[in-house]
Image (cartoon, grey):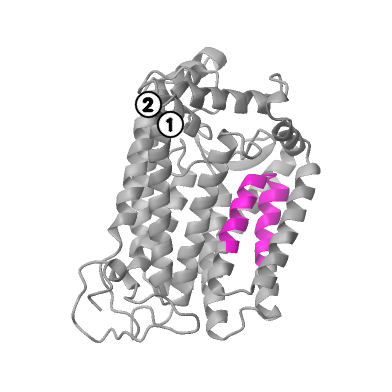
Amino acid sequence: MPSLQQGVVRKHKPDYMILLFMGIIMMVGLVMIYSIGHQRANVLNNIFGTNYPEDYFFFNQLTSVAVAVVAFFAAFKVPPKLLKKIGAAVLVAGIAACLVLAVAALVSGGEGNAIANCTYGACRWINVGSRSFQPAELLKLGLLIYLAIFLGARGRQGKVNESETLLPLAIVSGIALFFIVVLQRDLGTGVVVGALVLSMLVVAGVSKKILILIMSAAVVLGLIMTVAVPHRRERLMTFLGGDSSSIEDDDAYHVTNAKIAIGTGGLLGVGIGNSVQATGYLPESINDSVFAIMGETFGFVGLLVIIGLFVILLSRLLKVTYFLHNSEGRILVAGVFGWIAAHMVMNIAAMIGLMPLTGITLPFLSYGGTSMMFVAAALGMAFGMSRYTAHSPVIEGKESDESSSSRRRVGRPRYASRRSS
């Protein structure tokens, strides 16, 4: 990413609001896992005869948070010029990991084995000892970095809307989506990848006509991939059936109990440790359904606070994008915005019945380490980019002319005050 550090904008302190709100959301997640982790352990022990200690899930989540924080600061410390060098390598590593998972799943016939972990009609995880790793997360990070560099360079050349840009973009994105949607049978993560790429294209300056064509094609392909796979088709029919769907249907049971959890919470919730749905009624209460359990625990007011925390975090990313004059950095931060926003919207919408059920985590709140680690790493890169924002917003076709030759340091993000310019 040339000229990010020299000759354009003076390096200054990052936007600590990004770090603050990520930390607050993580702490809320730890409180939730602490409050319902023992219930999850009891359910699994009673049903499957396992021997999980009551604090097993909390300490695992605490470890995941620690790893995510390390990933955040490691990504923050990566020099922008180094990102340019490692982008392709990270993308290739993600594709290779997905290929390993695809081969292992193919050998097992999609039922899972010592390498491939397949559940709920999808093969998303690679078993690593007693833990699992989701290669699609590494692929998303590689795609984020690679496309930011590629689109930024094409944008400076004025070729972002030309075939020599759009064709390679379509090939790389198509390969990623093929591994995730077709081979791993994970349409939800495919939608997240689509949102990530679309956010980057918007900020890169792709024309509205091309964006409309891309979105139209994505909708058509999404519908085809939905009706072509039985478990996706069943989820769509459950969604369309609404409250009239049979409670015996697994997806209808899941969504119904999620709504019961949120409704039971009322205005202020039943309080920490008093969740009934977490005792075994609501599937995946500690993972994908944690939003519904938070509704039961903290009530409608609590859910508004949770959504508000995400909205503020996302708004800070948008603000960085608005005041970041370097093309690659601006596009990268936009991709991080699309990544997190897609996870949040899809998870919450599924829990309240506004879209079909998907296996999408709620960032920093759902139990698990892979998604949290890579989202934190992406956010760490955006945090690093916030050190290069300018006083003035981006004007299309112009870069900042603020020189870095001055030794004067700025003690806060440059967009914090327009008057100081």
Contact, CB < 8 Å: mark 1 with mark 2? yes
State whether residue 273 appears in this view: yes
Q: Residue at x 47, y 74 (%)?
A: 328
Q: Which mark is residue 168?
A: none
Asked where in the image residue 243 lies, by quadrant, the reply is top right
Give, as a single range, the part of the protein colored magenta. Answer: 172-198
Q: Seen in the image, is 240 located left or right of residue 285?
A: right
- Left or right: 396 as drawn, with respect to 320: right
Q: Secondary structure at mark 2?
A: loop
Taking depth in this image into account, of 48 and 162 the one nearest to the observer is 162
Q: Which residue is mark 1?
A: 300
Q: Residue at point 21% right, 73% down?
A: 410
Residue 383 lies in the magenta-colored region: no
The CA distance from mark 1 to mark 2 is 6 Å
Q: How far across and down, in percent of the image, does residue 335 sit?
A: 51, 62
Write down the residue under mark 2.
268
